[in-house]
Each structure stands twice: as structure tokens, then as C-alpha cells.
Amino acid sequence: MLFGTKSKKELLTRHTVIGCLAVFLVFLFWLSRPELSFDVRVWRALGDTTFSFLFITLAISPLAKLWKPAIRLVPWRRETGTWFALLALSHAEKTCEVSFGLSAEKFEFLAEQYIRVNVPKLLYPDPKGISRIFSIASSPNDKNKISMTRKFILRILSAISYK
């Protein structure tokens, strides 16, 4: 009937089950990084859960071909794919990348490292202070530039004074 399900109630039940699984995975990934701040933990947990749902969605069909009992999971692909898209949008909302050229500066870092940046002069007072944490998106092998990402970076950059 509706999207290959027998009723609207079954569709709602499936989305509820997958939604609860998504919340549970976000919580587990959030718990796995106690050393990070709350915002960074949530952001990374959403990203990790997004990739988990992408993997599940893409793996269902090949798994069903290789292992016959997994054929029962095939009707659930639509729900896992829908929740993948929702998680990806929530993770990427208002995320932006900023790149800085590194002329003579020596800046070494590891993959998946983050950096705290202090902005000494703000145009407007910010109750969170002058420092923010950014994820480094560059390869450690690229010595000419560094790219950083952060949610709500547009708000931060709009507060920087260029005087």
C-alpha cells in the first residue's frame, strides 16, 4: 500500500523503531568522547550515527543476497535511508569550512584533531567568550593550508573585527 508497507500504522511503527535506534546510537557515540565539550560531542555523535545509518542502508541488499535470513531487512531500507538523510541534515546544518593559507608558519597536527581558536577582538560581546573549538578538516600532509569546520561558524566570523 504505502511505500511497500501494509498500513500507515506499520510505517509509523517502523519509523519509530528506527528513530529510537538513531537516538540510542547518538547517545552511545556521545558517551564515547567524554574529553570533548558538549557541543563537539553532539556534533561528532550525529556524524558518526549518520555514517552508521549510511552503512546499514547500503549493506542491507548485498547482505540479503549473501545471507538469506537477512531478506527480512530489505523492507526497512527506506526507513534507514530516510533517517540517514535526517541525521545528515542535522549534522551539516549551518556547517561551513574556512581555509587559511600557511605561508611561513609551521603548524603540525594529527588527523581528526581539533583546535581552539581565540578571537581577541569581537565586534559584539559574546556570552560564550572569545574562544571556539574547530575540527581540522585538512590532511596533515598538506603543508600550505589548513581547513577548519564548525557549526554556526557564520555567526562567529560575523563577530570578528578586521580593524
Image (cartoon, rainbow, N blue to C red):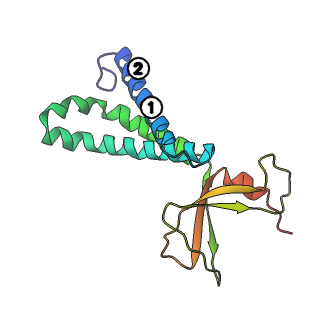
Seen as rendered, the residue at the extreme front is: 35
- Could you tell me which quadrant the N terminus lies in? top left
- The image position of residue 95, as x and y in percent, is 60, 52
Q: Which residue is pictured at 45% across the width and 46% down the height?
A: 48
Residue 12 — which label? 2
Task: Please identify, in this view, whether the residue under mark 1 or under mark 2 is nearer the observer.
Answer: 1
| Marked residue nearer the N-terminal end (1 or 2) | 2
Compared to residue 35, the image places residue 163 above or below, namely: below
How many residues crowd mark 1 within 10 Å: few (<14), some (14–19), many (20+)?
few
In this orientation, which residue lies closer to the viewer: 118 or 123? Answer: 118
How many residues crowd mark 2 within 10 Å: few (<14), some (14–19), many (20+)?
few
Q: Which residue is pictured at 52% across the width and 43% down the height?
A: 89
Q: Which residue is pictured at 45% across the width and 37% down the height?
A: 28
Q: Secondary structure at mark 1?
A: helix
Q: Is residue 82 left or right of residue 115?
A: left
Q: Amino acid at mark 1?
A: Phe
| Count of numbered badges drawn on the protein | 2
Location of mark 1 (residue): 24
- Could you tell me which quadrant the C terminus lies in? bottom right
Quadrant location of residue 3?
Answer: top left
- The image position of residue 152, as x and y in percent, is 67, 50
Q: Which residue is pictured at 54% across the width and 79% down the height?
A: 143
Q: Secondary structure at mark 2?
A: helix
Please say if the residues under marks 1 and 2 sit with CB atoms less than 8 Å apart: no
Q: Amino acid at mark 2?
A: Leu
- The image position of residue 87, as x and y in percent, is 48, 40
Measure the C-alpha gap from mark 1 to mark 2.
Answer: 18 Å
Residue 78 — which label? none
